[in-house]
Image (tube, helix red, strand yellow):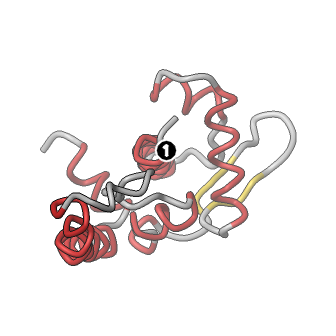
């Protein structure tokens, strides 16, 4: 599973939890989330464990327990989710060192680094400005 899909699945799960809580639910199980996301409950449990470590979720034990938001959905940003999941940059340089004799290969990194940096800054600003509550509002029909 890529870092980007992990963020999407976590956002989906927390948005579902916010909706569930709005309807009066207290705890959300991995089976409930897996049914909505259409993935294996193990995938959900692994993601939720990471979010508990970062204090975005609380976990409960016993029948009917699972997870719940650790704070109101308005106070959980997508940037916090990305940080908790260790999201990778949207763009990366070559894995291998480019050719030392090619002028394009030698100039490509200095040309792309500032561009990618600006893109990452824009992504970070957008994620910081977007809460789980915003996603829930935009998800539900008017």
Horizontal and vertical percent for residue 12?
A: 42, 43
117 left or right of 7?
left
Establish if 22 lies above or below 130.
above
The structure residue drawn at horizontal position 83% and vertical position 34%, both measured from the top left corner, is 63
The structure residue drawn at horizontal position 66% and vertical position 35%, both measured from the top left corner, is 29
Q: Which of 24 and 100 is in front in this view?
A: 100
Q: Nearer the viewer, residue 15 or 22?
A: 15
> Taking the image as drawn, is residue 22 in sight?
no
The structure residue drawn at horizontal position 33% and vertical position 75%, both measured from the top left corner, is 128
8 left or right of 1?
left
Horizontal and vertical percent for residue 56?
A: 60, 65
Establish if 1 lies above or below 112.
above
Q: Residues within 10 Å of mark 1 (few under 14, many from 20)?
A: some
**Residue 102 falls in which quadrant of the image?**
bottom left
SS for tag 1?
helix
Residue at the disc numbered 1: 6
Q: Please identify the quadrant where the C terminus is shown.
A: top left
The structure residue drawn at horizontal position 61% and vertical position 22%, both measured from the top left corner, is 40
Q: Nearer the viewer, residue 27 or 129?
A: 129
Horizontal and vertical percent for residue 15?
A: 41, 49
Q: Which of 80 and 69 is in front in this view?
A: 80
């Amino acid at each position: 599973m890529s870092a980007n899909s992990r963020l999407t699945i976590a956002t989906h799960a927390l948005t579902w939890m916010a909706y569930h809580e709005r309807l009066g639910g207290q705890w959300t199980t991995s089976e409930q989330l897996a049914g909505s996301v259409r993935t294996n409950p193990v995938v959900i449990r692994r993601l939720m464990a990471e979010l508990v470590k970062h204090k975005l979720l609380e976990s409960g034990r016993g029948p009917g327990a699972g997870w719940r938001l650790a704070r109101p959905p308005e106070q959980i940003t997508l940037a916090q989710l990305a940080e908790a999941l260790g999201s990778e940059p949207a763009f990366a340089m070559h894995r291998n060192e480019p050719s030392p004799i090619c002028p394009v290969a030698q100039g490509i990194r200095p040309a792309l680094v500032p561009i990618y940096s600006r893109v990452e800054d824009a992504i970070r600003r957008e994620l910081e400005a977007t809460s789980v509550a915003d996603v829930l509002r935009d998800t539900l029909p008017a």
